[in-house]
């Protein structure tokens, strides 16, 4: 058995650039994992994936030419089944041994080679054998087939290959792109594997236009990257090619001067890396008159349509220069630069035309048109949706400010969706909200309304900024709550990893605004307001309970990610705190309470009280008739609760949750004495109701900050 480095490459037509990195990583990881499973590669093997527009490859160190033979012990059957009373092999045993390839010509000898060992209550027969290790060619064939099968292909192509046989014909092949070459080298030896109708060799092809050699011959596995770079003019490594693009972008920006920098966009950088085999960055420019168009429009058209990198000045404003990552590097790049400048000009002209045309109509004049745009076939038009958002936004604004804020929120909510009817948003849906802000300024509506319209989709993703002003927060909350309540009302719930309407994102947006803005808003009340917009008499289902659970579950997940324990989070959120901004204080209080010596006993008692109240017949009121407190222990508990509750309630009302729970800790002794000396379910109905009322009062007092029973072991 010899050890050598392995190189496998699939040479194909241009792969989808957005998926290239994922395809390269998947091809390498699955192939190597299969080699490791077969014992051909080890955990110490170094794996280097390669992915360029026309190839997927992997280099693996320390790959064996043959896997080590393995000693295997296999359970056959119970002794009572495999051997007769005379100790001879039964037909069942002989048949099993034959199936395993054992020599049974001498049955007695075959039986003597078996081992006996306890197996549960009985004794069983075990067969020892040596499984020969797989040769690399066979193991690699299996690994290669598996790697190709498991590629996360966005869309499969079907193409035909001419069959390699005496009779002419064609065979159908399904793959992400037509494949034209296969390399499999173990050291300098070509391995006889096949894939996609191709036989492995030791040659590949380089850059379409700039390769020094039409066919790049690889002397061994380790020469792959160097040979491709020198003879094929290709940087095969996705990571190296990406880093080279970053380096050249920075160098080109420095050459322009003035502190300009290329726009940061990781997705665009990955896509461009998937488009070029050897990058060459060039500086281009467009006419300054286009800078009158909102820079978001120009940036988007350059990135999305042309894959260019716009240059921003030190203040973050767009300049009239941009960078192109070319796949060729001619001695005179003027033709390439001129071509790219000619291509981008019509795109920018279109954006300017849309912007100029859109400003000929006010946002207000577009409101009526929303009534003709279907939002959802079960939820009506965008116009109907706007009215629901307005109602929620006004209710929120009334709690956050005065009549001026309510009026501003109403205007912003009425106009927030109107930019959906503009030419610019029709061409670039990603600009909805942003363009509404620009058009609101043009209409003279002021910065407050413009910001609210622009920001009402925020936060759009994890880590996104929140709306800037109170009006924007009111509209953003209303928009997200309307979306959540509406889709829940027609039973469009997220399931598993499927969330087509991004409801989890909307819920997290609501949570972030309430928490990070410190808003004095009652989430339970907000859910109720949103639910009212979808009345049951119009065919909608009640959503309050399910929506409340959904939002608090999202909040729970976020809190656990911040380091709070599941027990702490469950205890606090079990009482559905209405103001999310004080949940962290509640969590801190619960953690402090759990550290008290009385905590465990009180939590257990609280759990016991909860179970008793659940089993009680009918509703239990938190009322106590002191005249019916006959037992000293119940009198003592009532007195202790009556003594400590006013201060505990006052501390709770002031948000001093830890201090409130600390005051209640003194109830441990009277609670223990109560359960030791008092029969709660007395035969006398009046006594029983009174004692349940005392426990109900205690339960309510102890569980205002959190459900303390969740702390019980």
Image (cartoon, grey):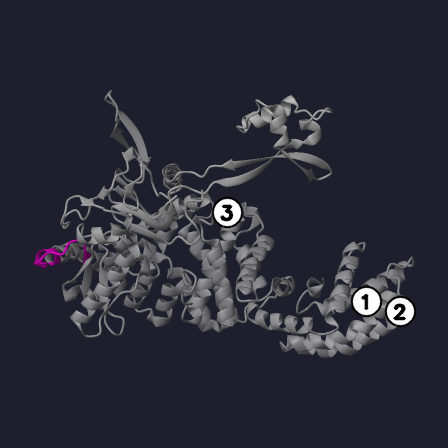
Q: CA distance from mark 1 to mark 3?
A: 44 Å
Report which quarter residue 567 is drawn in: bottom right
Does the segment drawn in magenta span residue 574? Answer: no
Q: In the rendering, at what x and y percent does residue 590 appear?
A: 65, 70
Q: Is residue 109 left or right of residue 237?
A: right
Residue furthest to the top in view is 167
Q: Earlier in the sequence, mark 1 or mark 3?
A: 3
Q: CA distance from mark 2 to mark 3?
A: 53 Å
Q: Secondary structure at mark 3?
A: loop
Question: Which residue is painted at 80% across and 65% down in the image?
Answer: 695
Tag on residue 629?
Answer: 2
- Is residue 83 in sight in this rendering? yes
Residue closest to the eye, 471 or 282: 282
Question: Which residue is painted at 46% across and 44% down in the image?
Answer: 37
Q: Quadrant of the C terminus?
A: bottom right
Q: Which residue is mark 1?
A: 694
**Marks 1,2: beta carbons within 8 A:** yes
**Marks 2,3: beta carbons within 8 A:** no
Report which quarter residue 260 is drawn in: bottom left
Q: Earlier in the sequence, mark 2 or mark 3?
A: 3
Residue closest to the eye, 21 or 118: 118
Q: In the rendering, at what x and y percent does residue 625 appear?
A: 86, 69
Q: Earlier in the sequence, mark 1 or mark 2?
A: 2
- Is residue 373 in sight in this rendering? no
Residue range highlighted in magenta: 325-337
Q: Which residue is mark 3?
A: 492
Q: Quadrant of the N terminus?
A: top left
Q: In the rendering, at what x and y percent does residue 362 appear?
A: 29, 61
């Amino acid at each position: 058995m010899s050890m050598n480095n392995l190189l496998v490459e699939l040479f194909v037509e241009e792969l989808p650039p957005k998926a290239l990195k994922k395809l390269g990583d998947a091809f390498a990881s699955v192939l190597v994992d299969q080699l490791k499973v077969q014992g051909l590669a080890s955990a110490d093997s170094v794996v280097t994936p390669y992915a360029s527009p026309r190839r997927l490859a992997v280099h693996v160190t320390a790959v064996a030419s043959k896997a080590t033979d393995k000693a295997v012990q296999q359970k056959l059957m119970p002794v009572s089944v495999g051997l007769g009373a005379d100790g001879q092999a039964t037909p069942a045993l002989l048949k099993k041994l034959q199936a395993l390839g054992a020599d049974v010509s001498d049955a007695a000898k075959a039986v003597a080679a078996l081992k006996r060992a306890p197996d549960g209550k009985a004794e069983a027969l075990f067969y020892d054998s040596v499984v020969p290790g797989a040769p690399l060619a066979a193991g690699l064939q299996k690994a290669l087939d598996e790697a190709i099968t498991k590629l996360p292909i966005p869309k499969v192509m079907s193409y035909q290959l001419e069959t390699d046989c005496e009779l002419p014909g064609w065979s159908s092949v399904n793959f992400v792109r037509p494949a034209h070459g296969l390399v499999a080298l173990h050291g300098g030896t070509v391995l006889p594997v096949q894939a996609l109708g191709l036989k492995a060799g030791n040659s590949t092809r380089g850059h379409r236009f700039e390769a020094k050699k039409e066919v790049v011959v690889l002397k061994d596995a380790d020469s792959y990257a160097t040979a491709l770079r020198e003879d094929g003019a290709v940087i095969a490594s996705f990571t190296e090619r990406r880093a080279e693009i970053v380096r050249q972008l920075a160098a080109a920006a420095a050459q322009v001067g003035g502190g300009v920098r290329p726009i940061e966009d990781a997705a665009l950088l990955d896509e461009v890396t998937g488009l070029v085999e050897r990058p060459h960055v060039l500086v281009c420019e467009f006419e300054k008159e286009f800078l009158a168009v909102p820079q978001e429009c120009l940036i988007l058209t350059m990135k999305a349509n042309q894959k260019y990198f716009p240059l921003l000045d030190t203040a973050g404003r767009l300049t009239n220069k941009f960078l192109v990552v070319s796949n060729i590097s001619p001695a005179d790049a003027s033709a390439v630069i001129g071509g790219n400048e000619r291509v981008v000009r019509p795109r920018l002209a279109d954006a300017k035309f849309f912007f100029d045309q859109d400003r000929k109509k006010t946002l207000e004049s577009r409101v009526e048109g929303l009534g003709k745009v279907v939002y959802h076939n079960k939820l009506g038009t965008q116009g109907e949706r706007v009215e629901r958002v307005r109602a929620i936004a006004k209710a929120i604004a009334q709690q956050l400010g005065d009549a001026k804020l309510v009026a501003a929120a109403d205007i912003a909510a009425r106009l927030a969706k109107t930019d959906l009817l503009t030419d610019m948003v029709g061409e670039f849906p990603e600009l909805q909200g942003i363009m509404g802000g620009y058009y609101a300024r043009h209409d003279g509506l002021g910065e407050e309304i413009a910001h609210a319209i622009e920001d009402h989709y925020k936060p759009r993703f994890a880590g996104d900024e929140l709306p800037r002003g109170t009006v924007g927060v009111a509209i953003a909350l209303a928009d997200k709550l309307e979306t959540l309540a509406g889709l829940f009302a027609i039973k469009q719930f997220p399931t598993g990893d499927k969330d087509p309407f991004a409801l989890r994102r909307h819920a997290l947006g609501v949570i972030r605004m309430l928490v990070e803005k410190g808003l004095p808003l009652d989430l339970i009340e907000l859910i109720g307001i949103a639910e009212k917009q979808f009345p049951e008499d119009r065919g909608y289902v009640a959503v309050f309970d399910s929506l409340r659970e959904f939002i608090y579950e999202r909040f729970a997940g976020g809190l656990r990610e911040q380091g709070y324990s599941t027990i702490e989070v469950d205890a606090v959120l079990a009482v559905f705190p209405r103001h999310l901004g004080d949940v962290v204080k509640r969590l801190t209080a619960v953690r402090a309470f759990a550290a008290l010596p009385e905590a465990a006993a009180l939590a257990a008692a609280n759990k016991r009280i909860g179970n008793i109240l659940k089993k009680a017949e009918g509703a239990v009121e938190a009322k106590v008739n002191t005249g019916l407190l006959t037992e000293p222990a119940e009198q003592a508990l009532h007195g202790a609760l009556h003594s400590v509750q006013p201060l505990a309630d006052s501390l709770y009302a002031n948000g001093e949750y830890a201090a409130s729970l600390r005051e209640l800790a003194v109830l441990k002794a009277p609670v223990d004495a109560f359960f030791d000396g008092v029969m709660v379910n007395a035969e006398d109905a009046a006594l029983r109701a009174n004692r349940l009322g005392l426990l109900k009062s205690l339960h309510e007092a102890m569980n205002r900050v959190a459900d303390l029973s969740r702390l019980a072991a």
